[in-house]
Image: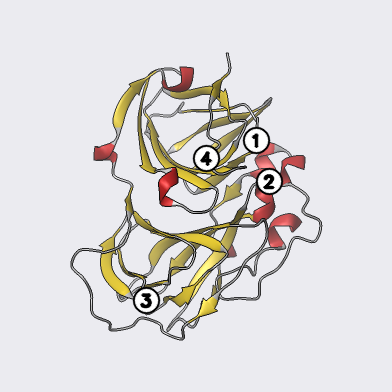
Amino acid sequence: MSARILLSAIAIGLTVASEPSGTLLALEPLAQRIGHTDPGKYRRSRSHDSAGDMACETLLPGNALSTNFFFMHRCQVMPGGGVGHHFHNQCEEMFIIFDGEAEFTVDGRTSALKGTIGAPVRMGHSHAIYNPADKPVEFMNINVTAVKGKYDAFNLGDPRVGVAKDPVPVFMTMRLDRNLLRPIPGYRGGQGTARYRRALSPEVFLTNWSYVDHLLLPEGASEGRHRHTGVEEIYYVLNGDGEVSVERETARIHKGDAVPVLLNQTHSFRNNESRDLELMIVGIAAEKGALDTVEVK
């Protein structure tokens, strides 16, 4: 899809491409707006003076939403690879690993963390990640800017190889652990009993990035129809298969898919398969603190 390719060289240490028209992907059919994880589309590169390679694709570009979302990358961090130590002063970022173990650094302090886990990083705080193992680590990077489309980076020239590590991280982390979810019957007016947890709250972020939620829908369960007047969302499928409805369109979704939902779009998710449908939901507000949910009958 041409709109997605426009940001194929975005901020992983490559030249940052801009959106010349700013045309929202919402003009395209739902099935085409959904990002699909496809390792065949990954491109190898080095990021912010890293010691070794990552292989990445742009799962969703900045024009997937109208808010200050900038990108969602899906990657593999190769053995000896990662993202070198750097700052952003105009955007916030979160590295997530879905398996294995990687060395996360925030503000010069490093800890080895096991997936699935993420580390949100506020504006003006240095960060890096390194894979010391002998096999790739499944990785995601999410970036939200203070001003729509305005990206910055300051590299420190440090790949963070062989550094001292704290046994307990001294920075914020986000663990997506099913054992932490709590049951909610009829979630947002849906069927069955969902399991839910807010993994990161608005207070974590300085930008309009508002939350990260963890949602699990067992067989036959659904998240009911609802909309947000002040928040846009990305639903990322961690595991399973299911069905999404946005306004009057419906599409099948699978592990590794990312579904963008714009302001005021009525949406719902349903698990009509035998395996659990597990979702990570990234919420970005149009204005700081403008959070709302309107259930739609």
Amino acid at pointer 3: Pro
> Viewer-proximal residue, 215 or 283?
283
Residue at position x 38%, y 26% in the image = 219
> Viewer-proximal residue, 160 or 29?
160
Which label sits on residue 280? Answer: none
Residue, far top: 297
Quarter of the image with the N terminus in it: bottom right
- Tell me where residue 57 appears, x and y as whole percent: 57, 63
CA gap between label 2 and label 4 equals 17 Å
Name the mark nearer the viewer: 4 or 1.
4
Q: Tell me whether circle 1 and circle 2 mark residues in contact (CB < 8 Å).
A: yes
Among the two numbered marks 3 and 4 on one chain, the one whose residue lies closer to the N terminus: 3
- Tell me where residue 214 appears, x and y as whole percent: 39, 39
103 relative to 288, above or below: below
Secondary structure state at the residue bearing disc 3: loop
The residue carrying mark 2 is: 66
The residue carrying mark 3 is: 79
Residue, far left: 167
